[in-house]
Image: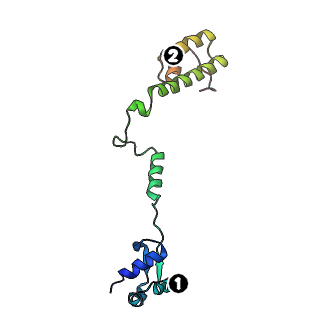
Amino acid sequence: MQITNQKRLAARILKCGVHRVWINPSYLDQIANSVQADDIREFIEEGWIKAKPIKGTSRVRARLRLAQKRKGRRKGHGTRAGTANARNPRKNRWMRTIRSQRRVLKAFRADGTIEPSQYRRYYLKAKGGSYRSIAHMRSQMSVEGVTFTGGEQ
């Protein structure tokens, strides 16, 4: 039993593709015997022939991938396109460290932990790249005799 013609007619009437035409298997015999477009229209009205809904692209996998990326996954060698400097520029790294160090030095000067002359000395050392981090800077300062009270960074 061939229903190719009927499917083609239905597709034209429903204004969809042939592959989106659904025919109720219970009424295949009646539909196979019909040859006119009017018959097909009738079957569509009765609900024997329908257009399947358009399939979209599922976002499920994309959402899962995004969730993984937010957790810091999927960053291996195969994913990387730029150089290390393109992905995390040296300048940005430097700006982050120096700004945080300068912020801490200003706080130390403001609360009297260090004198303005000491501030200038540590500021210039920080500018010269002597300290890797705030913790490193504080440890060097404590070695040189600066005492900290418990309230600041």
Q: Which residue is mark 1?
A: 45
Q: Secondary structure at mark 2?
A: helix
Q: Quadrant of the C terminus?
A: top right
Which image quarter holds the N terminus? bottom left
* Disc nearer the start of the sequence (1/2): 1
Nearer to us in this view, 126 or 9: 9
Q: Position of residue 11 (x, y in %)?
A: 44, 75
Q: Position of residue 46 (x, y in %)?
A: 52, 86
Report the residue marked by disc 2.
Answer: 127
Q: Is residue 51 above or below residue 133?
A: below
Q: Residues within 10 Å of mark 2 (few under 14, many from 20)?
A: some
- The kind of secondary structure element at disc 1 is helix
The image position of residue 41, as x and y in percent, is: 49, 83
Q: Residue at x 46, y 58 (%)?
A: 60
Viewer-proximal residue, 143 or 105? 105
Amino acid type indicated by mark 1: Glu
CA–CA distance in space, label 1 to label 2: 81 Å
Q: Is residue 5 above or below residue 58?
A: below
Identity, as a three-letter code, of the amino acid under mark 2: Lys
Q: Label 1: few (<14), some or many (≥20) within 10 Å?
A: few
